[in-house]
Image: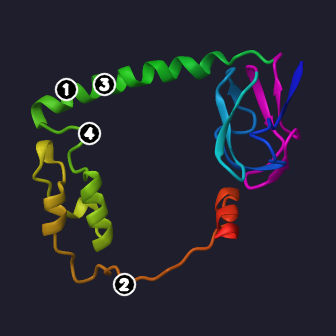
Amino acid sequence: MVLEMKVPSPGESITEVEIATWLVEDGDYVEKDQPIAEVDSDKATLELPAEESGIITLKAEEGDAVAVGAVVCHIDMSAAKPDGAAAPKAEAPKAEEKKEAPKAEPVKETYATGTASPAAKKVLAEKGMSAADVQGTGKDGRVTKEDAVNAVPSMGTPGTGSRTSERKKLSMLRRKVAERV
């Protein structure tokens, strides 16, 4: 049995929405109430949950303007849940933890070794450098903001003088705000 998922009405006076992003891919198995897409309207961005469990077939592309009540995807409810999909995901983190634990004791390295903190990443990005270019002095070798501030880029590294611009389509909410400003 195939269920046609239609765009629900996000509110009064809204006649169409835009598919902002699909959170699943065509042919994926989805669970009931799992978020499958984000839709933009004139007033808000909403998540679209799956109405039933099954294999999904997408009928609209990201960026498409879709009328309220239009079919955006089909869910094949007769499809069985794949056995191999859930089991490896549950076992994989345990295997990784076992691998990391012995490594952490003798070398004193962790996942954070050589990784920049969020503030340090921003400073390094402004300087055009990567975390690998800086020696971390934080806990377990983590690159701190102070390390990033004190780092000196090499002569070959370009500065922040680049003025590239990128054009992309505005969301429905931003278009409506721009229209009314």
Mark with earlier residue (4, 3) = 3
Mark 3 highlights which residue?
97
Whole-percent x and y of residue 13? 81, 47
Label number found at residue 102: 1
Label 3 or label 1, whichever lies nearer to me, is 3
In the picture, measured across the screen, residue 3 lies left or right of residue 91, that is right
Dot 2 falls on a residue whose secondary structure is: loop
Image quarter in which the N terminus is found = top right
CA gap, disc 1 and disc 2? 45 Å
CA gap, disc 1 and disc 4? 13 Å
- Three-letter code for the amino acid on which mark 2 is drawn: Gly
Query: Residue drawn 69% across and 64% down?
Result: 175
Location of residue 34 by image quarter: top right
CA gap, disc 3 and disc 1? 9 Å
- Three-letter code for the amino acid on which mark 3 is drawn: Glu
- Three-letter code for the amino acid on which mark 4 is drawn: Tyr
Mark with earlier residue (1, 2) = 1
Residue range in magenta is 52-78
| 123 or 83, nearer to the observer | 123
164 relative to 113, above or below: below
Label number found at residue 38: none
Mark 2 highlights which residue?
161
Q: How is the image coloured?
A: rainbow
- Three-letter code for the amino acid on which mark 1 is drawn: Pro
| 141 or 162, nearer to the observer | 162
Crowding around mark 4 (Cα neighbors within 10 Å: few <14, some 14 to 19, many 20+) is few
Label number found at residue 111: 4
Mark with earlier residue (1, 4) = 1
17 relative to 171, above or below: above
Whole-percent x and y of residue 63? 74, 55
CA gap, disc 4 and disc 2? 33 Å
Location of residue 84 by image quarter: top right
